[in-house]
Image (spheres, grey):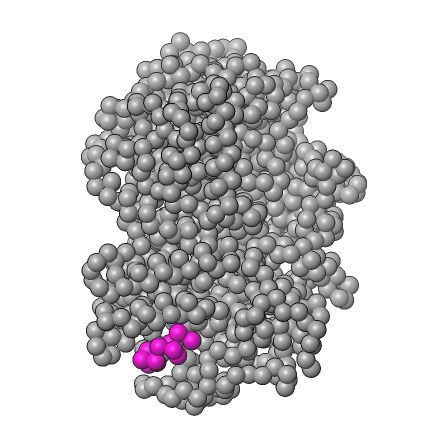
Amino acid sequence: MFVTHYSLKTVSLFAFLFLLISACAEAGGGNVIKNEGSVKTVGNINSGGPSNARDSSGLLRVKSMVSGSGNTGGSGITRVTGNTLTIKSIYAARFLTQATFGPTADEIRSFVQLDDVNKWFEQQVGATYRAHLPYVKERQAAIDQFLKLEKEAESFAYISRHHRWWDSAINSKAQLRHRIAFALSQIFVVSEKNPNLKDAQYALTDYYDMLVRNAFGNFRTILEDVSLHPAMGIFLSALKNEKADRIKNIRPDENYAREIMQLFSIGVHLLNQDGTPQLNSQGNTIPTYNEDLVKEFAKVFTGWNLAHTAWQGHMTHGSTTQSMVPWNNYHDMTEKQLLNEQKLPEDQKAEQDLDAALDNIFNHQNVAPFISKQLIQRFVTSNPKPAYVKRVANVFDDNGNGVRGDMLAVIKAILLDDEARNGAGYDPGFGKLKEPLLVISHVWRALSAIKFDRGEYGDFPGVLVYRIPQAELNEFTGTFGQGILSAPSVFNFYRTDYSPPGVLREQSITAPEFQILNENTLANLLNTLNWQVQNSHTSETQWGTTFDLQPLFDIGDDTKRLLDVLNLVFLSGQMQDDLRQIIHKHLNSPVFPPGSAGVKVRVKDAITLVISSPDFMVQR
Amino acid sequence: MKHDESRRQFLKKLASITGGAALLSTQQQFQLIQSALAAKNDYSSLSDYKSLVCVYLYGGNDAFNMFVPNTSSGYQQYVNVRQTLAIRQEYLLPVAGERHAFHPSMSRLRNLYDQKKMALISNVGTLLEPVTRSTLQKQAVQLPPNLYSHSHQAEMWMTGLPPITGKIQHGWGGRMFDLFMQGLKSGDIPPVYSLLGNNEWQSSVTTIPFSINPWDDSTGFNYLSGKKWPKREKSRTTAWENILKLASSHSNPMKQQWASSIGIARERLASFSDAFAHVADIKTSFDNDNHLAMQLRKVAQIISIRKVMGQHRQIFFVGIGGWDTHGQQLTTHADLLSKLDNALYSFQSALAELRLEKSVTSFTASDFGRSLTANGDGTDHAWGTHALVMGGAVNGGQIHGEMPQLVLGGDDDSGNDGRIIPTIALDQYAATLAKWMGVSNSDLNDIFPYLRNFATSDIGFMA
């Protein structure tokens, strides 16, 4: 079924093909991709073939993808019978770039085979995943032993916490779930940079587990689980917050009350459903709350303590992984004023007040646009059109079955919206700068990063998963500008409305990820990845994680195929001719050794040039 | 006057030029500035060396526990209001005269204060115009927006401007430097250095700060810096450069910006690496485990190669987080002040080694002060705070400004919780520093649009 009235905004081949796809999809964000006659594939895609058992799926599958011969592996270059780049594989590559920690040839192939994005979502929801905390605790014994500590040193668990995160990001099948948790961790920020949380690594681990668990759940549940988690209680000091005591000059701590509104739910000014700010008759924004309201909410968040401990105790004695528990002696029992003129009556217990207050916040009209826009920014594009934000916000308000705050529905709405699927085809402003952790994960996944389970001096065996010489995994914030649960403050790594000076600010284009980009982080990022690429399959692999490039070496003689694969996996098929020609020219230069040695370094150079390009760094 | 006019127009023109194209390399910026200048200007005649170091304390420093009244009535007032958070008098470190004292963690800075190399600027905060308790209560006065929000107040401390939703504003350090860029010799590296990444204080029209890692000496982009040999790297580098050039012809502005950032980084890293070969061998020890100390050590090193880089004016940004002491205040604050004390003292010692004590001024800045009242074991966001200014050119060993009455609901309280109304505006504090750097009075008013609302633009803490 062709839709001929669709207006073409560009004449590029791929844009045309994308438009065909969208025309066949349902309006308002297609969620079914059918292999109908109108969408013609170009060449063959291998739709079968035995799978190889392999720890990390990366470009091993490349061979079967391009050959269509169903070979299981082994050496030798198979003949080309089809193209790597098809409408479907390109769709898959772009979708998986947005929805996972980076596409692999294997997962592109599976996605194409599945041929039904709804089924992909079902698989993702059903994919098994493991909580990190049990593993982290279990590995702690190994760390304590290695460090010759007499007792459990939770403060060192940051090592296993970070490594376990990377293991999941690179290897877990539950990619979307983990990707959502990662996005949530940048909204509901807690950070080990806080001096009080630095040593509470079990709390941090469990906090992240909680986000992972809630990824496909309900936003209201997230609000509650976050509010009652010890990590947040410590981070924003709701823990052991007491009702007022006039004699001792004590009033309730306002920290959590302020930030739960400013950052976790409604923001500082009223929004339209499309994310744009509401303006009063003088053209000024309208605040969502004032200081008095902050004080009122501060009274709500009183009387909460860690489980299994007394009120007067050190902050981290007691359970730092179980939900906080109410101590009503310390809870403010007065009347409280909330948003939208709602009042809480006096004499309510802590748990009653909390429940009602969270409902009050959850039901505020700002939540849908405020949260939807930020999630769009984490997955798809930094400058969503207001209409896109509105479509997603509407789904947040009602998933179609009368449910508010359905995270799965919201994520689907974000990923399947026409703007997400096709924006690159018609909007030069579409897209986002990849954040450092996603640049790294994309490269590591696509190129089969090899696990490295020993430190520089053989330290922490059995705990480490990957290693790079440039920085320890837990030092990524200083090195690349970003690290997991390691932001400089509750305001995350970057402000959501940041625009760097230069062409972006001149055109009022928002690009949050540029806020952590500077000489230091840029050089470190490229130097690290290129060290890994250039040193793969050499004796330098003893120093850290490198890549298994054999499948690419196997096709390295055929420059076109090589570049097709790199184009698909890294650039979602968008490599322009002029870029391709530049890489070609280098690969054909008389600067390479002869024979198979030359093939290897050509492959490495092709990878280096692709991943060091603006086309890779900017996700479209 | 005519001269000032042409400079203002120049800046406007520059803004429109640099805004319309991809971000210029620093070399191009200098060329643009030199060619745009019609006549000689005030700043080109600077031949002495001066630099400012902004030491940012993220989260809001509880300065009312950093510097405490020590007379019997003053201390009593303090104890009455601070109660569980009050520092015991026997632990305080009195300054000469003994009417005030520093927090127990600050023995080195107390000594610098007594040596007159450090001044205390009392009760500074963000203001658009002077505020008193009565004008506040009558709501007859303009206030900075979102007074107790970290992000808004930190932005205002760094920009000197009330934050406007959705608008990115330049920092006052950056605006100051847009003027100095005219008078400085052309070089590849801007004299604007950050040891803590991108920050609003240094953001400006003409330049983005040069970000440096305190530990590593980044030399550039490995595998992509081939000049002549090996041939493969040279060819690869050329290919990369061509790929970057493509970005400016693509219509995607984010790719253009990224490619442009790479271009700037390459230039800067190469030039800096060459210059850094001449770094002085500074004997003063800096504590390896103190991140602020490591940042300041790097600052001292950069200062030591200022002549190689041809820089007469430089600004540096360093910082330390964790000051938002809503809980665990007594131990946390003590630890942070100790780090501050140690790092600043090492830095001043290194400057003494370089014989530049009079040429470098360090000053603290923070989101806000903290409430006199507690929430149990911590304090909340408040307003007026004390600041420290350190250097050989400082009128040290004294308090500049008025110490507030530490009384709940008193004349200095904005309400009843002990959020003290500042008596010195951030603009005044910053303008005093900018003036020392050589900014003219008329330019001060351009950089600080609200400055004219206050009685004086020079608090007097710089000699």
Rendered view: B72 above or below A397: above
Residue at 76% in and 66% down: A401
Write down the region rendered in magenta. A554-564
Rendered view: A337 above or below A452: above
Rendered view: A310 above or below B449: below
Q: Nearer the viewer, residue A104 or B271?
A: B271
**Is A320 colored magenta in this rendering?**
no
Q: Nearer the viewer, residue B356 or A126?
A: B356
Residue at 48% in and 47% down: B21
Residue at 61% in and 21% down: B129
In the displayed structure image, the side of residue A360 where residue A316 appears, left or right: left
In the rendered view of the protein, which quadrant contains the N terminus of chain A? Answer: bottom right
The image shows residue A608 at horizontal and vertical percentages of 34, 65
Q: Quadrant of residue A557?
A: bottom left
The image shows residue B360 at horizontal and vertical percentages of 33, 25
Rendered view: B239 above or below A238: below
In the displayed structure image, the side of residue B444 where residue A522 appears, left or right: left
Any part of residue B104 in sight: no
Any part of residue A75 in sight: yes
Q: Nearer the viewer, residue B350 or A79?
A: A79
The image shows residue B44 at horizontal and vertical percentages of 35, 26
Residue at 71% in and 22% down: B139
Magenta segment, principal secondary structure?
helix
**Is A555 colored magenta in this rendering?**
yes
Q: How many marks?
A: 0
The image shows residue A63 at horizontal and vertical percentages of 40, 83
